[in-house]
Image: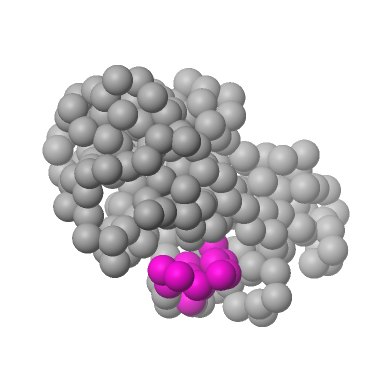
Amino acid sequence: MRRLDTRTIVVASHNEGKIAEIADLIGPFGFSAKSARELNFIEPEETGTTFEDNAAIKALASAKASGLPALSDDSGLVIDALDGAPGVYTANWAERADGSRDFVMAMNKVEKALQDKAALTPEARTARFVSVLCLAWPDGHTEFFRGEIEGVIAPEPRGTSGFGYDPIFAPEGHDRTFGEMTAQEKHGWKPGEPQALSHRARAFKLFVETCLAA
Ligand code: IMP
């Protein structure tokens, strides 16, 4: 495992929701970080078939373009009744013909697919959010950190916090969806704490424990 010995990195993302969460998570560690979006880097095409593949594509593109270590996140919603869909194609389900993203449409698509499978009870609507973080260096070295959180798909969207599919995902042990939680509740983690809640915070905790540990 290669340690990260600089605190100047690129956050290899163009997704405002993810950039905000990663900024929150790295905040306490004194990072100076710019996002690929702020740096006007071209968004690479996600041609992989796994979260790991796509996370590596994004992190390596930013590390090579900047000459700095870069941290990416590839994530998605894996729904059991839909045989794991939308999975690595979670962002695609929100894509409109003009290239813009519409998550109300995407959440309706999920609901329609679940109804087509007669998946109406919480037991039939189990799912997990997955986040794979990739830390890539300009020399091509990569490290991966995977976080998952089990939950259920709510019968209708609830709450306006967060981003993407947050309003339809209620994490295990909670009645509220991520869309009804503050960012701090969704992370469920602070440096030094043993537990984290969201998939991204769980992956980030692994990154801290392995690449940043003294
Ligand atoms: P990608 O990693 O850029 O391929 O996109 C991941 C997709 O999953 C995006 O459409 C996000 O909206 C969705 N997603 C990932 N993490 C979360 C989350 O924490 N909350 C809600 N949606 C998420």
Q: Position of residue 198 (x, y in %)?
A: 54, 62
**Above/below status of 208 relative to 145:** below
* Percent x, y of residue 148: 62, 53
Residue in the picture at 17% in, 29% down: 66
Magenta span has 196?
yes
Residue 9 coordinates in the image, percent (x, y): 23, 43
Number of numbered discs present? Answer: 0
Residue 51 seen in render: yes
Q: Is 166 positioned to the left or the right of 64 in the image? A: right
Residue 59 lies, in percent from the top left, at 35, 32
The magenta segment is: 185-198
Tell which of 51 and 67 is nearer to you.
Answer: 67
Quadrant holding the C terminus: bottom left
Specify whether 181 is left or right of 155: left
Q: Closer to the camera, 212 or 108? A: 212
Determine the image quadrant of residue 183. Answer: bottom left
Q: Is residue 167 visible?
A: no
Residue drawn 31% across the image and 29% down it? 137
- Which of 94 and 171 lies nearest the eye of the viewer? 171
Q: Residue visible at 42% across and 29% down? A: 142
